[in-house]
Image (spheres, rainbow, N blue to C red):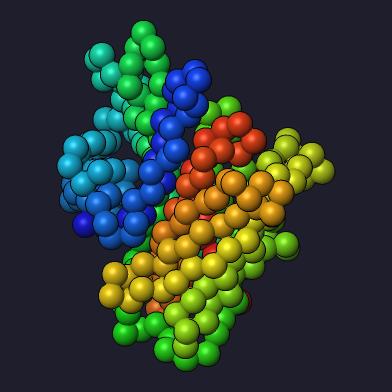
């Protein structure tokens, strides 16, 4: 069973009371994913059991598979449930150009909640091979480049991070983390990408809980903050991934996942 961190929110508009602020499930707290092998080496033949809140289980298998690829890994499942609507479940490997994550993956789940008044519960999660606490450095510091983002919201999809203007610094001695993340909205080409906001903040490393948690703020909109939770993945903590959740991006709720690779 995989432990996860997830940013979750709904896409319904409640009029004068606004959109719901997304909930953030800390790494290892409630959300889990289980892989049920079917006796072959192909991941596409396996079944997956996802519990976003640790209770209700959503099952997807080969009969629900809508699309798949192996390099980079992408498995997308779709199923329509009576009186609830379309469920879309996707597992993918973080990939950007020649740079790929080795030890952590992204999970996206759009949980349809109605046929006559359709809206979705959205879940953006990260999971993989977490670093053992004893395998993390205890002294010194390291810089990570945040190279990937999977983010979405009601009418606000296609967000990413500009790695050239973003960095994450980890102080192992003090168990602290500082973040600078330049979010961009993707256009049809790189020339059409537009800046959204520069977010910065700090966090802490809790080895007992195996969690990296913190807050990001935008200097131009200090009333809007992002909460984040994640952990290190791979030997020696060479990758850092976390889920992030905020109240809006302009006028939209937002949530997603970010991965950073140690330099």
* Residue 35 visible, this angle: no
Considering only vertical position in the picture, is 130 above or below 193?
below
Residue pictured at 58% horizontal, 46% vertical:
224
178 or 62, which is in the foreground? 178
Quadrant for residue 133, please give it.
Answer: bottom left
Image coordinates for residue 211, horizontal then vertical, percent: 36, 67
Residue 199, quarter of picture: bottom right
- Which residue is at a point 38% across and 12% down the rendered structure image? 117
Residue 13 point in image, percent of width and height: 48, 21
Can the viewer see residue 227?
A: yes
201 over 140 or under it: above or below:
above
In front here: 23 or 140?
23
Figure disc tally: 0
**Image location (x, y in percent) of residue 191:** 82, 43
Which corner quadrant holds the N terminus?
Answer: bottom left
Horizontal side of 211 relative to 51 (left or right) equals right
Residue 56 located left or right of residue 123:
left
Farthest right residue in view: 191
Q: Residue 131 at x, y = what percent? A: 36, 74
């Amino acid at each position: 069973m995989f432990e996860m961190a997830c940013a979750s929110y709904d896409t319904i508009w409640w009029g004068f009371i606004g959109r719901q602020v997304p909930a953030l499930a800390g790494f290892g707290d409630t959300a889990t994913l289980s892989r049920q092998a079917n006796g072959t080496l192909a991941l596409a033949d396996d079944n997956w059991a996802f519990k976003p809140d640790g209770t209700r289980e959503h099952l997807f298998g080969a009969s629900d598979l809508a699309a798949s690829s192996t390099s980079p890994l992408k498995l997308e499942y779709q199923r329509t449930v009576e009186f609830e609507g379309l469920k879309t479940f996707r597992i993918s490997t973080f990939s950007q150009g020649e740079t790929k994550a080795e030890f952590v993956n992204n999970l996206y789940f759009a949980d349809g909640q109605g046929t006559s008044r359709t809206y979705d519960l959205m879940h953006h999660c990260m999971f993989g091979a977490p670093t053992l606490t004893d395998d993390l450095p205890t002294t010194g510091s390291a810089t990570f480049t945040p190279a990937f983002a999977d983010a979405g919201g009601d009418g606000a999809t296609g967000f990413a991070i500009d790695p050239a203007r973003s960095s994450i610094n980890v102080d192992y001695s003090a168990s602290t983390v500082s973040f600078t993340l330049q979010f961009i909205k993707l256009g049809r080409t790189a020339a059409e990408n537009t800046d959204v906001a520069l977010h910065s903040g700090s966090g802490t490393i809790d080895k007992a809980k195996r969690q990296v948690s913190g807050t990001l703020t935008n200097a131009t909109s200090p009333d809007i903050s992002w909460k984040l939770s994640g952990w290190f993945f791979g030997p020696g903590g060479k990758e850092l991934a976390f889920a992030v959740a905020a109240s809006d991006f302009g006028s939209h709720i937002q949530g997603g996942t970010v991965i950073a690779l140690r330099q």
